[in-house]
Amino acid sequence: MNSETSETILFQGHPALLGSVNRLLIAILTLGIGVIYFWFQDKNTNYLITSERIVIESGIFSRKIDTIELYMVNDMELNKPFAQRLMGTGNLTVISEDHTNPVIHLLRLPLDVRQLYEKLRLSIKVCKQSRQGYYRET
């Protein structure tokens, strides 16, 4: 079994539509018009997080696809602002050696972000260890 077939999906989906109390209040104050804007914005952003890479596809008319291989990730930051904790979402910031996009923000992830963070941390370690010459354990 080669490494190409062992890639597993950790998360696939969109940012949460009303992933924070702030967005909920905007939706209420605009009598639902804000929801339409948020829906267009979020449905045109797709996250694919696997055990080997992170792919963000975004755009309405033109599509942009950003990919970061996990062996290139240097650091991650988990952020759960109060307004998002109330709605059960959180953010991940990924810092990598990628020259075109060294910092990516995965916003309003609609799942247990802490659990995803831990799975990603382990996947990054495995990817780095399997890429000899790119990673040295200290």
Image: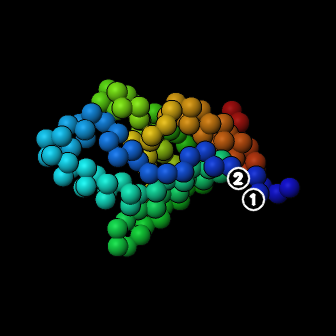
Q: Quadrant of the N terminus?
A: bottom right
Residue located 55% across and 43% down the image:
74
Residue located 82% across and 57% down the image:
2
To which quarter of the image does residue 61 belong?
Answer: bottom left
Circle 1 SS class: loop
Residue 47 rendering spot, x and y as whole percentages: 49, 53
Residue 62 rendering spot, x and y as whole percentages: 37, 73
Q: What residue type is labelled 2?
A: Glu
Circle 2 SS class: loop
Q: Can residue 38 be seen in this view?
A: yes
Q: Quadrant of the C terminus?
A: top right
Check disc 1 and report the residue beneath it.
Answer: 4
Residue located 53% across and 57% down the image:
55
Closer to us: 64 or 110: 110
- Sort mark 1 into few (<14), some (14-19) or many (20+) by Cα contacts within 10 Å: few
Q: Can residue 134 be seen in this view?
A: no
- Gap between marks 2 and 1 measured at Cα: 6 Å
Residue 79 rendering spot, x and y as whole percentages: 40, 32
Closer to us: 59 or 69: 59
Horizontally, residue 43 falls left or right of residue 114, namely left
Q: What residue type is labelled 1?
A: Glu
Q: Is residue 4 above or below residue 28?
A: below
- Label disc, if present, on residue 7 of the rendered structure: 2
- Label disc, if present, on residue 102 of the rendered structure: none
